[in-house]
Image: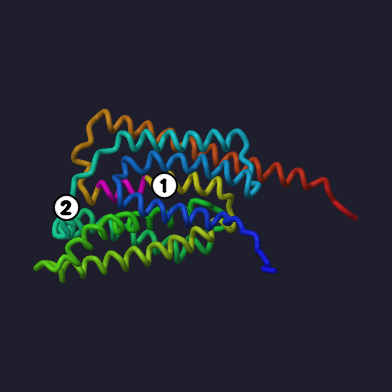
């Protein structure tokens, strides 16, 4: 007889990694203004699945925080400016060489080095925002690299006069994407070893969305089309998101305190 092995469910880190792989493909196939509002539903579905499969329960404050994070992020995306179209690798090179984007990239790299080398070893296990910040900042490179790979691949393998230059751009973007994804998944695993996947996914979704929008706005110069109504809408969205994140933190601390209090009287001689 053939011995059958039951399928094992994905653990919390594998679920987040698989979900982010889908996000990378989605950002390459559609604009962020379409992908991100749909991604907001993933936070709610993640909370539901984690409560049934991983026994990670959210109280009322935690559930309200998830809803506020999703609603605020959707409002933020709705009022975010649309990106300008980039149709060739040469135009993409010009955008990547823009001094504003270069300065932003250098600041992000410097902040990542500080977080990974000094802050994470000391405070990573006590403050969830350390790991969330690292993974979200890396999203600036993963999403922009993913979007650029499609443009560079068209010219790199077309056999045209600029194919060699486009091939160099393609390899550079591929290397950047590979390194950033590996580091990002490493810190996602570390975060899920110490924190609830419910709380991590909600906060990570918000910060990841914000950093990706910032990088896309700088690279594609979206900030030139922002009006007063959009500015007010984005401010309201950020306020709702901040309240949602605060409720998630309060929910997590209250749950931990309750568990410690419940275990206190149970002592054995």
**Mark 1–mark 2 distance (CA, rounded to whole Å):** 28 Å
Q: Is 8 on the left-hand or right-hand side of 65?
A: right
Give the residue drawn at x 72%, y 47%: 260
Q: To which quarter of the image does residue 222 belong?
A: top left
Disc 1 to disc 2: CB gap under 8 Å: no
Q: To which quarter of the image does residue 255 belong?
A: top right
Return the residue nearer the eye: 175 or 233: 175
Give the residue drawn at x 52%, y 52%: 128
Residue that extends furthest to the right in the rendered view of this protein: 269
Relative to residue 217, is residue 232 depicted above or below? above
Label 1 sits on a secondary structure element that is: helix
Residue 109, x across and y down, in percent: 34, 61
Q: Looking at the rendered structure, which numbered label has been put on residue 94?
A: none
Q: Is 112 on the left-hand or right-hand side of 172?
A: right
Give the magenta-colored segment's residue range.
210-217
Q: Looking at the rendered structure, which numbered label has been put on residue 207?
A: 1
Q: Looking at the rendered structure, which numbered label has been put on residue 87?
A: 2
Return the residue nearer the eye: 159 or 113: 159
Q: To which quarter of the image does residue 34 belong?
A: top left
How busy is the neighbourhood of tag 2: few (under 14 within 10 Å), some, or many (20 plus)?
few
Return the residue nearer the eye: 148 or 219: 148
Q: How is the image coloured?
A: rainbow
Relative to residue 225, is residue 220 depicted above or below? below
């Amino acid at each position: 007889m053939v011995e059958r092995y039951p399928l094992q469910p994905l653990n919390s880190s594998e679920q987040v990694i698989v979900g982010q792989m889908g996000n990378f493909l989605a950002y390459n196939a559609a604009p962020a203004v379409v992908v991100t509002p749909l991604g907001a539903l993933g936070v709610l579905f993640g909370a539901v699945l984690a409560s049934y499969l991983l026994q990670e329960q959210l109280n009322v404050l935690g559930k309200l925080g998830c809803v506020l994070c999703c609603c605020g992020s959707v409002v933020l995306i709705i009022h975010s400016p649309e990106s300008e179209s980039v149709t060739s690798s040469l135009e993409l090179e010009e955008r990547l060489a823009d001094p504003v984007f270069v300065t932003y990239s250098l600041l992000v790299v410097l902040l990542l080095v500080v977080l990974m080398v000094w802050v994470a070893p000391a405070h990573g296990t006590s403050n969830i925002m350390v790991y969330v910040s690292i993974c979200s900042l890396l999203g600036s490179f993963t999403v922009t690299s993913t979007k650029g790979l499609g443009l560079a691949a068209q010219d790199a393998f077309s056999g045209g006069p600029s194919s060699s230059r486009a091939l160099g751009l393609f390899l550079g973007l591929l290397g950047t994407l590979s390194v950033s994804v590996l580091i990002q998944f490493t810190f996602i695993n570390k975060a899920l070893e110490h924190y609830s996947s419910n709380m991590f996914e909600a906060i990570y979704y918000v910060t990841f969305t914000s950093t990706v929008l910032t990088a896309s706005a700088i690279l594609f110069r979206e900030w030139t089309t922002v009006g007063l109504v959009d500015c007010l809408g984005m401010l309201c969205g950020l306020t709702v998101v901040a309240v949602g994140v605060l409720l998630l933190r309060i929910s997590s601390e209250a749950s931990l305190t309750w568990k410690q209090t419940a275990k206190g009287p149970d002592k054995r001689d």
